[in-house]
Each structure stands twice: as structure tokens, then as C-alpha cells.
Amino acid sequence: MKTHPFASAALAEARKQGASYADIRLITQEQEDTLIRNGNITHLDTSISDGFGVRVICEGAWGFAASPLMEESEIKRVTALAVEIARASSRAKEHDVVLAPEPPAQETWLTPVVEDPFAVSMKEKLELLFAIDDVLRESPKIKVAETGMQFQREHRLLVTSEGTIANQTLLRSGAGYSATAVEGNEVQVRSYPNSFRGQYMALGYELVRGLKLMDEAERVREEAIALLSAKSCPRKKTTLVLDSSQLALQIHESVAHPTELDRVLGMEANFAGTSFATLEKEGNFRYGSDIVNLYCDSTIPGGLATFGFDDDGVRAQRWYIVQNGIFVGYQSSREIAGALKRARSTGNSRAEDWSHIPIIRNGNLSLEPGDADFDAMISEIDDGIYMETNKSWSIDQKRLNFQFTCELGKEIRGGKLQGLVKNPTYQSITPKFWGACDAIAGPRWWTLWGVVNCGKGQPGQVAAMSHGASPARFRNIQIGVSE
């Protein structure tokens, strides 16, 4: 595969300056973001970001520099600066950077897309968003209605001194809405298909068409209104059933973040703290019940962390984090896999854009579906509660003690879903919670949910990933809050 002349210039300059390893990422990012609030366009933005970042190892330490100026003289200057930074960093290093081996590859990879969202007219998109807005605001009790879409396309070219040339085009689409009902001092919100602006996947505009956004608007509006007068979540220990979207965030906070190897080793603590899942637990620690199987998959169709290669040039792969309830794996980069003398990185090294250095980021981490029928799972509960759609969350700096609040709850009595419960909340401790899982619905109910707002690092970076799950049941879980 023929490389880019700018990449050749960067690698040649890195060798000239004495670097033992170098890579360059040339990235163009195109984004379209639309938001309507109460019948008005409050955000309509189209943007393009273009630039490159050079990363080197010199004297056993990393150096990184970046620029938006795509000129050969700037490529050479930035590369020399990266080497200079590496030499300065080497004076404070504890050990040399050693990269886990990875065979070089020269490939092109594209997100499979049926309909290019950037080719769909803005008129068509706005007509759909305004139509949803009209339905949501048919009741005067809905004080805030928000509808939106977001699309992003990235062209990423990675060239390394080891011979890898990865030319990738990654695309994602997202859409959703929310209705906020107000009566006196009571405020309730319902969202569709998920909270935090909806559902996102590595698909084209076919995602938006498939979400059936208009079909659900009336239900969402009426549920928001009904929650205003619903009973509050009781405080007790009971059987809890979570819908797949809430489980996706549960996976993100209590499995994905604590299994990032940089957190485990204390190399990273920003935003989400460190981790209880320390190295001696790998292979023997009971993370959940026997039916709990959690895996990462960078090849799964539609995943926001689905790609051909990560920013270390590691090919996408699938592996278990928890298997039959036992903790068996981490998420790593070539640097940390190399430091721990592991045979290979899991391919979790990603950067937000050209201006940031790659760090370990969560992959598409999912809960395998079980064999339970959802209705049967509910019918076996004499007294319990069902919760769906995340509203808020809190978890400690070791990723152990947590509390989640959902938008909507339903009591379960005598094996049947009963009336609505507002502000349903549950609390637990990570291994205790996953250990309490005694039923997982089958593949029919499994959904891959996108997360686009995961923050990490200093300076901070935002990354996207997906978590799949079917609804699941957990026994003897504390719900409600102290008065």
C-alpha cells in the first residue's frame, strides 16, 4: 500500500532525530449536530477538523506533538518537537517504554453504511425533528422538549515506523429526544430511545429510519406526565430487573472503567479514579454469578469502538473480561501490555482526535444474552421492581460502591408489572451486584447501546464506545434512598 508523503516525511525525520519508534496519525473529522428545543433550533453546527499528531519513542520515553497545519515543513518541525519532548521525558522515566509485539499490516477499513447521513437533506432531518417536537408539546405539562441528531465521519490514516499503514473511515449516527413534565415542584423526564440524547451506532442514516422516532413520541410524552403523580420508589431490599439501556451504563461504570489497565496500575485516575480489579485478581476473582459473561469486541457491527485497527496499529479483536462469573481479562495498550510482558495488546489505545495522544479507552464491552424469556423472568417474581433508562449515577473512586437512578420504574407484584414508580434508585457493590444476577433475557431482547460522552485523561479526552445487554434480574438489591 502506498503511504502518504507527509507520513514518509515524519518517519524519516524521526529516524534522523534518533527515535527508535515513530507513528503519525493524519485525521480529518467531519461533524453535523442539530438540536431543537421547544420548537426552536438551538444548535445547528457543521464542522471539519483537520490535522496530524506525531508520537515517538526516544531514549525509552514517549514524545508527542501535533498541528493543524498540513505542510511538509510543519510535519518535520512537529516531529522534531516530539523527539525533543521524548528526550526531556526520559530524564524522569522509571523504565523504558516497551511495546508488545504486533504484526505490521497495510489495510483499508470502512464502517459499513447503507445511507450516508451527510447526503440526507437538512430539510428532511428538520422536518422529522419538528414533527416529534410538536407531538411532545401537545400537553401544557411538557415544559421542555428536546429533539436532536448527530453525525460524525472520520478519515484516519495511521502510519508507523514498523510498517503499518491503516487507512480507516469511521462513521457514526445518533438521534433521540426527551420530554420534561412539570407540575408544581415536581419534575419528571422521559427519553427515547435512551437518555443523554438518544441512541448512537456506527451506522448511517438507516439508524434514524429504524428507530421509529415518531411512533414512540406520544408514549414518551404520556409517561413523563404520568410520572408526575406516580408513587415514589420505596426503600427496601428486593428483586430488581433492569432494562438493557440501564444495564449498558451499569456495565460502563462497574466493569469497563475498572478493567482499564492504566487505572489498575495507578497510571490514570482522572474522571473515574483507579480500580479495585488489581492484577492478583485476574483468573481467580469472582466478579459475578456463573451466568455472567462480559466480553469486549472491536469487530461487532454497529459498535462505536468498532474499527479495523486501534491507534497503536493493533488489529480489532474479541476477548472476555468476565467468563462464567470469573474475572479473566483487562483492556490494554501496546505500552502497558509490553510493560507487563503480555503477548499482545487488546487494542484499546485510542485518541479523541489528531491533537491528543492515544490512551487506553473502553471498547465495546457487552453482557452476553442468557436463555431466559423476559415475561417468564418477571412472572417468577412475587415482589420486586423493574427500572429502565438512566437518569443519574454515582460510583466511588475504586469502582465499587455505586448508586443509579432511572427515569421510570414499575412495581412487580405476583409476577406482573404494576403501576409506575418515579425516581427509582438502586445501590450496591460491584461484585456483590453482579453476583446477585440470576437471570438474563435471551438474544431477542439484546441491544447494543452507544455511549458518546465518556471522559478520561488530563488534558481531558472524550471517546465513544458501545455496551450491549439484555434485561437481567438481580436478587436482594437495595432500592430507594433514605429520607
Image (cartoon, rainbow, N blue to C red):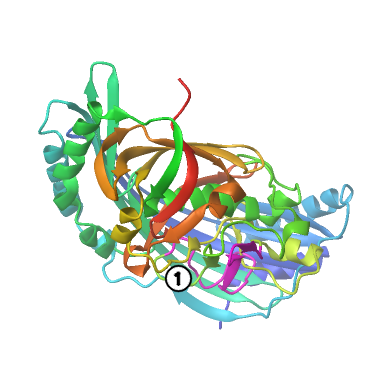
Residue 132: give x, y in percent of width and height: 16, 44
- Left or right for 349, reference 161: left
- Left or right for 205, reference 288: left
The residue at which mark 1 appears reads as 300
**Above or below: residue 232 compared with residue 28:** above
Label 1 environment density (alpha carbons within 10 Å; few <14, some 14–19, many ≥20)? some
Q: Residue drawn 14% across and 52% down?
A: 215
Q: Amino acid at mark 1?
A: Ile
Q: Quadrant of the N terminus?
A: bottom right
Most common SS among magenta residues: loop
Identify which residue, 115 or 86, lies in the foreground: 115
User: Is residue 120 visible in the rendered structure shown here?
Assistant: yes
**Residue 303 sits in quarter:** bottom left
Residue 154: give x, y in percent of width and height: 44, 61
Is 164 inside the magenta-drawn segment? no
User: Is residue 13 visible in the rendered structure shown here?
Assistant: no
**Above or below: residue 443 compared with residue 149:** below
- Furthest residue in direction top, as rendered: 184
**Residue 343 sits in quarter:** bottom right
Q: Quadrant of the C terminus?
A: top left
Residue 156: give x, y in percent of width and height: 51, 65
Identify which residue, 56 or 41, lies in the foreground: 41
Q: Residue drawn 46% across and 65% down?
A: 155
Disc count in the image?
1
- Left or right for 32, reference 363: left
Secondary structure category for the residue under label 1: loop
Looking at the rendering, the stretch of residues picked out in magenta corresponds to: 303-329
Is 317 inside the magenta-drawn segment? yes
Residue 126: give x, y in percent of width and height: 18, 47
- Left or right for 439, reference 326: left
**Above or below: residue 391 compared with residue 115:** above
